[in-house]
Each structure stands twice: as structure tokens, then as C-alpha cells.
Amino acid sequence: MLITDQQFEDKKRYVKGMFSLGGLSECGKSAAGLYLNSIGIKRMKIIQIEKEMMRARNYDFTGHPSEEDFVKLYSGDQEKVFREFLYRLIQKMEEAGTYYASIESLYRAELGAYLKKELGPRMMNIYIEAPIEVRAKREFKKQTVDNGKDYTFAEIVASTKKKDQFKIDKGAKKVKNIADIIINNDSFVENEQEYENIIAGIASIVKK
């Protein structure tokens, strides 16, 4: 995609506020995104923009791209790829008629740092953390109580750790180093309102 400097600068001016949500499996990214969406901050997925970019490059995949596809996408001039990502993301915001968006799930610290550099105070990188035991309990409830599946807690812990490793390999923990705000979400199940209050407070900073 050919993007002139003028087109890029014009696109950036459209954004009034953007949040990235990072963290390991079942830390609360989706809950934060859903809450932000409920107050007018459009929930968007980073993977959807990445897939769009891959299709534009004629990558051959169905469903979820392979690890090789991600490596290929971000090889070469990484900043140029990030620039296209942001441009396409803002196009999606324009199509949705929103000036505010949250993007899940940020696993590349370099992308978060780039978005902050380009959007300044309109961009907020949020890292959400919670202990493995708490995150596994959330997944256990989701799979057994909500979805009626027959898993032991030990199996869920193992599965959560496996998903974590995939994200860690992509650099998920490094996102914490570039985060504007770090949220400890170790009691979300018991204190959902408290968590929503935190997210609402964060949203009000950008929307001022």
C-alpha cells in the first residue's frame, strides 16, 4: 500500500483517542475491550488488521495465519509495516464512524511504542496482568460452567500455560515495558465493578 506523508498525517488527525490492551491469556483484555466498547470506544482486533495486510500481500492462509506469515509480514522495514497498520486501522475507525478505539491484543512492544510515538497523548498502551492461578480459574469456569465441557483444572492450567508461551514467544511480556498503565487484575471475578471503574477512569483520561 502506497501511503504519502500527507495522507498519513491527515489520517492521524482523525483519531481522538486510542487504547492498546496487552497481557497474557485470561488476564482481562476482552473484558476491558467490551467495557470500553459499551461507552463508545470501538473494540477492534489487531489480528484482523494483520490478516487484511497479509491478504493484500497475497499470503496463502485460511483461518489463522501461521507463525511464518507473521514473521514474513514484520520482516524488512518494520516501521513501514507499522505505518500501514495504523493507516488501515484509522480507515476502519472512519468506516465505523468512531474517533475512539481500543485494540486487542498487543503482543509486539515495538508496535505499541510506534503508535505512542505517532499519536502522542491520544494513545495509551495498557498492560493487564494476573497470576496464572487466577487466569486458569477464569478459563476453567468458561470451559466447564459456561460451555459445559469436561476438563480438569490441571488440564486448564496446562492449556493456559501453552497459550501463554505462544504469546510470550511473540514478545507479549515486553509490552509491559512500554505500557503507560499497568493494571493488576487478580481479583476481577470477585470485583468486576472495581475493574470497570479502573477502565472507566483510564478512558476518561484520553477522552478529556
Image (spheres, rainbow, N blue to C red):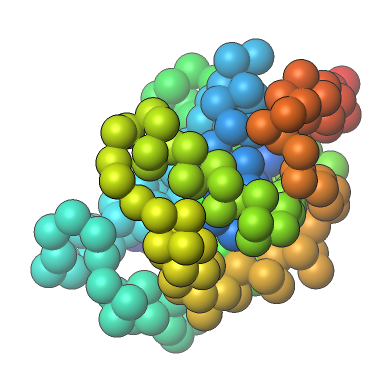
Judged left or right of residue 51, residue 58 is left
Residue at (71, 34) in percent of width and height: 188
Q: Nearer the viewer, residue 79 or 172?
A: 172
Above or below residue 161? Residue 88 is above
The residue at 76%/19% (across/down) is: 193
Q: Residue furthest bottom?
A: 76
Residue 197 placed where, x, y %? 82, 22
Give the residue furthest to the top.
Answer: 39
- Residue 177 appears at what percent x and percent y? 80, 69
Query: Relative to 207, is 143 above or below?
Result: below
Residue visible at 49% across and 46% down? Answer: 139
Task: Report how many numbered discs are placed on residues in the image.
Answer: 0
- The quadrant the C terminus occupies is top right
> What percent of the width, then of the height, locates residue 203?
78, 27
Q: Is residue 120 visible?
A: no
Q: Position of residue 136 (x, y in %)?
A: 55, 53
187 relative position to 60: left or right:
right
Which quadrant holds the N terminus? bottom left
